[in-house]
Amino acid sequence: MQELVQQGLIERKTGEQGVSYLLAEEALFSQTRMKAIESSEDPCILKCVRVLYNGKIKLVYLTGGYRRLDQCLPGMKSGDYRALAGAMMREVLFIRGNSILSCGCIDLSADRVFVDWSEKDVRLVCLPVRDKVPIPEAEFESMLREKLLQWGSLLPPEEQSGLEELNEQLSDPTESLQTLAEHFASYRHRAPMPGPMRREAGQMKLELSSVGTVPPVAFVVDHTPFLIGREWGTVDGAIPGEYPRVGRKHCRIEAGPGGYQVVDVNSKNGTWVNDVKLQPLVPAELAHGSVLRLANVSFAVRITGGGA
């Protein structure tokens, strides 16, 4: 990405509606990657609009409601930055695991990374362009670590002590990006959902075990509400990236009048109980022996205690 800018093949622009990129050559544009961005259910990838500008392709990203990272850093708290760093690493891993998109298409400039302050999450510009020279994963990861260290140094002096653990682990190449992402995304502040309820010993317990999957997936639902999806660091039950059809936030287990119920939270690929597809946001009962299916991943439902 940076190399294409330096070569004059991509020109960055900033306008009232957001940021944009003017492509010097039509051959740079990738329709396949454009479709992947348009169809992605990942809210952290900013949506892109393609327009013609003086005969050239212009890619426009609407960033209203978000703040530029470089404008946030001088007044940011260390805990918020740790959460954003975790979210940034998590998102890079998500794009890296995508068979169409490329990490090399992410703009890592601090004025082109955006912050959703209400969610303590990042919004990234991922360009639908072809890789002239694909950047190796190790090189991009090293660049990302350097950027995170650099950005952290821009926090107020009194916040620097709160970044010691993050800086130490970013500087340690033996610490995998996935481990760092899982750890630091947990600092993210989430608004509590109403009515949290812990199941005490001797009460009902719900266990979900995947059927016929490799690797296997299993959860013990020890509290409600219990959110399931692929966005680890945000959900309670994290589905591995090997199952991309499951939504980042797919469904929620809740306490019902007689036990447990499941709610599809507007997932793209649907939730089923015993082959009956759920309507979004409409609770359905989960009983012992039921089969819960999230997209193409099925779970056996086991409920014990409480007379189940």
Image: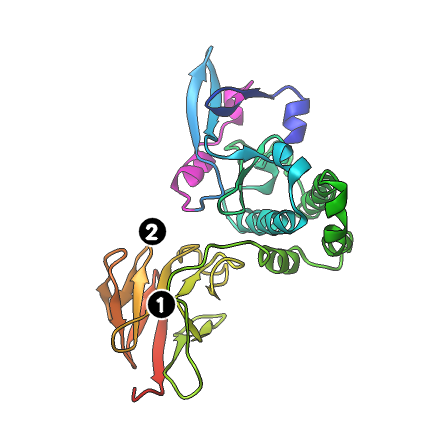
Residue extending farthest top: 54
Residue 293, position as x, y percentages in the image: 32, 67
Q: Nearer the viewer, mark 1 or mark 2?
A: 1
Q: Which residue is mark 1?
A: 253
Residue sitting at 49 percent across and 47 percent down? Answer: 119
Q: Quadrant of residue 275?
A: bottom left
Q: Which residue is mark 2?
A: 268
Instruction: Give the magenta part as a residue range.
Output: 21-41
The question of residue 271 being in magenta is answered with: no
Is residue 170 in view from this perspective? no
Cα gap from disc 1 to disc 2, whole angstroms: 18 Å
Q: How is the image coloured?
A: rainbow
Disc 1 marks which amino acid? Ile
Q: Taking 1 as reference, is 257 left or right?
A: left
Q: Nearer the viewer, residue 132 or 254?
A: 254
Q: Nearer the viewer, residue 23 or 166?
A: 166
